[in-house]
Image (cartoon, rainbow, N blue to C red):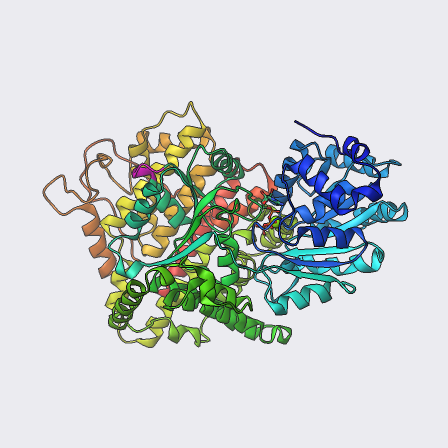
Amino acid sequence: MKKLPLAVQNMFGTEKQLCRKEGLVKLLRWHFGYSEFRGKQLEAIEAVLSGRDCFCLMPTGGGKSMCYQIPALAKTGIVLVVCPLIALMENQVMALKEKGIHAEYLSSTQVSHTREKIYEDLDSGKPSLRLLYATPELIATAGFMSKLRKLYARGLLNLIAIDEAHCISTWGHDFRPSYRKLSSLRTHFPDVPILALTATAVPKVQKDVMESLCLRNPLVLRSSFNRPNIFYEVRYKDLLDDAYADLSNVLKSSGDACSIVYCLERTTCDDLSAHLSENGISCAAYHAGLNSKLRSSVLDDWISSRIQVVVATVAFGMGIDRKDVRIVCHFNIPKSMESFYQESGRAGRDQLPSRSLLYYGIDDRKRMEFILNNAEVKKLESSSSHDGLSKKSLIDFNQMVEYCEGSGCRRKKILESFGEQVPISWCRKSCDACKHPNLVAKYLDELTSASTTCKKNRFTGIIINNSMNTTADEQFTEFWNRDDEASCSEDISESDDGMEILEDLSKKSNLSSKSGLNEKIEFLQRAEEEYYQKKNPNKQNSNLVNKKAISEVLREASKRRLVNALRQKQNQISKLNIELEVFAAFLECDCYKYGKVGKTFYNSQVASTVRWISTASSAELMDRLGNCSMKENDTCKMESLPSPSLPLTAPKDGGEGPIEVCKEEIDGVVGSECSFNHLKLETPSQDIKLPPIPSFSDFVKSKGKESRSNISSTSNKHSTTLVQKNAEKRMKFQ
Ligand SMILES: Nc1ncnc2c1ncn2[C@@H]1O[C@H](COP(=O)(O)OP(=O)(O)OP(=O)(O)O)[C@@H](O)[C@H]1O
Ligand SMILES: [Mg+2]
C-alpha cells in the first residue's frame, strides 16, 4: 500500500512533533514497516534534524540510508543525497517510490524531459519532492548549483547526505576524484547540516572525510564493523583438486541460496558461470564486458530469484540491496580488506546466518602483487603528492594475504584491520579458524610445503625492473584506484565519472590507460615474457615458448565459452536460429588463427569474440554466420567444422591433429604464419577472414558515440587494424 508522506505528517502531528523520537518511530513504522531503529540510526537522525553535522560509520547493511530518509519525511523541504553510482540512486529511488515517498535522481543519463520536470518541482513554491539524489559531478555544475542556491535561499534545503563518503578520501579504497568537488558544499550552504555515511573507513580515512567535507563539530557515530551473522572461511585452491568443482558442490549443497561469486577477470566469470550452469546451478555472469541490456536482465533475474547465483566482477554490488544473499564467494583474492569487507558484507543484510567463502590461490596472489607493484612503480614515477599512497595498495593487499595465510581468527583479523581491537570470544566459532583450528593449521602447513616446492616467485624481478614502460604502468591506475570495471566506460561505471573517462579514452591510443583488466593482464604477461627474454638474451626460453602454446584443452574450453555466449544471445533474440556448436567452432577457429602468436593473444581474441557476441545484432551474427557456412577458402581450408563431440585435435585422416601440427609450428617459429592449409577436414571449405571483432577500447569508444548494439563497419575496420597492430607489437616481444 502506498502511503503519502504529507498525509502522514498531518496524521502524526506537527513537524516539531515528528522530529521527536516518538514521531520518528512512527514514520519508520508507517513507511518502512520496521518496529525499531537499528544501532545508531536514531542518534544520527536526531543530530541532523537538530542542525548538527554527523559522521556515521555503520557496517555494510547496517541501515545507513534510513539516517537521511527519515529526516526527509520529518521536515518539509529537500534532502540532497550524493551517491557515487547511478545504479545505486535508481535502486533507492525506485524503492522509495514504491513506498509512496517522492524521491528522484538526476544524472547525465536522464532524458531532458525528466530533468525539466524535477527542476519545475524544485522551482515551485512548495516542492513535493523529499529526496533528491545526484552524482557529485552534477553537483559541481553551475546550473545545478544555482538550483540548489535557490532552494537554500528559500530555506528548503534541509540536509546534505553524502553516501559512501569514503570515496572522497584518496586513502579510501574507492577514491573518486569527483567526490573532491563536494568540499565546496559547506561554503555554499553554511547552515545546512551535512551527514557523511560510510561502512568502510579506517581511522585515517575517517579523519580525511571529516576534514574534506569541512564538518563542524560533527557528531561522530561509530558502530562496530563486526558482522556477527557472517561465517568466514578460506579454502586453498592449491590444495584442492578442482576449485570449480568444489564451489559447485558448495552451491549445490546450499539449496537455492541466493549467492554472489566474485572473480577478478571477466573471462573467469564466463568460464565459471558456464561450469556452474553445466552442473545444474542456475546462474549467470555479470561484468562490464556485457552490454547494459544483458546486465540489467541478469540483475533483474537475480533480484527476482529467477537465478540463484551471479558470477561477477566487482562491477556488481554497490547499491544492490538484496537482503537474503546467503553466500558471497571470492573466487580470487580481493585487492584489499576494505574491498573484501564491502563485498562479503553483501551477504546477510537481513541479519540471518550467511557465509563468506574465499578461495585463495598462490598464483592469484602473485598476479595481484604483480599488478599492484606495477601500479606502485607508476605512482612513484609520477607526482610526489602521492607520497606514501603508492605503497598503500601493497600494504592493503598484504592484509588480505595475512587473512588467508594466517591461522588466527578471521573475524578478529578483519576487525583489527579497521582499527577495532576485539577479543577472540567475539567470534563464537563463526569462522573456520575458530571452528576447526587444527584443520586450518593442517591446511596451512600443506600450503607452505606446496608453495616452497613451487618455483620462486617469477614476478619479483619485474617489480623492480624499470623496463616496464610507462604505457604499461598507466594501465593500472584505474584498476587499483577505482577497480577495473568502474574505469572503462559510462556503461560500466554507471556513473557520471564514466563520461569523463569515456572522453578521455577516446583521445587516447588503443593502449589506453583505461583499458580493461584483460588488456592489462595481457600486457603484464607480455612484459613478463619480455623480462625473461631480456634476462636470457642468448636463450629463447623454451618454457616461454611452450607457455605460448595453445592447448587442446584450452581450445575446447574456449569453444564452450563461445557456445555459452551464443546460447545467451539466442535466449535474448528468440528468432535467432543458429547451430551453436558449429558457429562456436567457427568462431574459435578464427580466434585460433589470429591467436597463433601465442596463448595470450588467443585468449584475448576469445574474450573479444564473447564481447562481440553480446553486443552484435542478429543481422551481424547472421552475416558472420553466412561467412562461416558459405565461403570458399584460400587461407584456411576446412573440409568440415569439427563435430561437437569430436575433440578438436582428432585427426580425420589418421595424421596429426590440427592443433598439434600448429603447436609444432608455433614452437618452431614463433610468430610466423601458421597455415591451416594442411588441415584435412570434411565439409565446406571456409574463407576465414580477419574477424571483425572490436578491440575493447574500440568497443568502449563506439559505445560512447553510437548505439550500443550497433558497431559500425568503420569501427570494425579500425579494430581490425588495431588487431593487426597489436599482433605486430606482440611479435616484437618475441
Ligand atoms: N531499523 C531497521 N530495522 C530493520 N531493517 C532495517 C532498518 N533500517 C534499515 N533496514 C534495512 O536494512 C537493509 C540495509 O539498509 P541500507 O541499504 O540502508 O544499508 P547500508 O548501511 O546503506 O549498507 P551498505 O553499506 O551496504 O550500503 C535495508 O533493506 C533496510 O531496509
Ligand atoms: Mg548504503
Extent of the magenta region: 277-281
Q: Name the outermost residue toward the left.
A: 654
**Between 191 and 241, the one nearer to me in the picture:** 191
| Image location of residue 476, percent across then percent down | 51, 62
**Between 488 and 257, the one nearer to me in the picture:** 257
| Image location of residue 646, percent across then percent down | 19, 38
Residue 502 in the figure: left or right of residue 463:
right
- In what quadrant of the picture does the N terminus appear? top right
- Picture quarter containing residue 644? top left
Q: From this view, report whether residue 145 is shown above or below residue 322.
A: below
Residue 295 in the figure: left or right of residue 657:
right
Q: How many marks?
A: 0
**Between 474 and 457, the one nearer to me in the picture:** 457
Residue occupying image coordinates x 35% and y 67%: 529
Q: From this view, report whether residue 177 is shown above or below residue 573.
A: below
**Between 6 and 180, the one nearer to me in the picture:** 6
Residue occupying image coordinates x 41% and y 59%: 333
Q: From this view, report whether residue 110 is shown above or below residue 80.
A: above
Q: Main secondary structure of the magenta part?
A: loop
Does the image show residue 475? no
- Picture quarter containing residue 98? top right
Residue occupying image coordinates x 38% and y 34%: 566
- In what quadrant of the picture does the C terminus appear? bottom left
Residue occupying image coordinates x 17% and y 40%: 680
Q: Name the outermost residue toward the top.
A: 575
- Picture quarter containing residue 693? top left
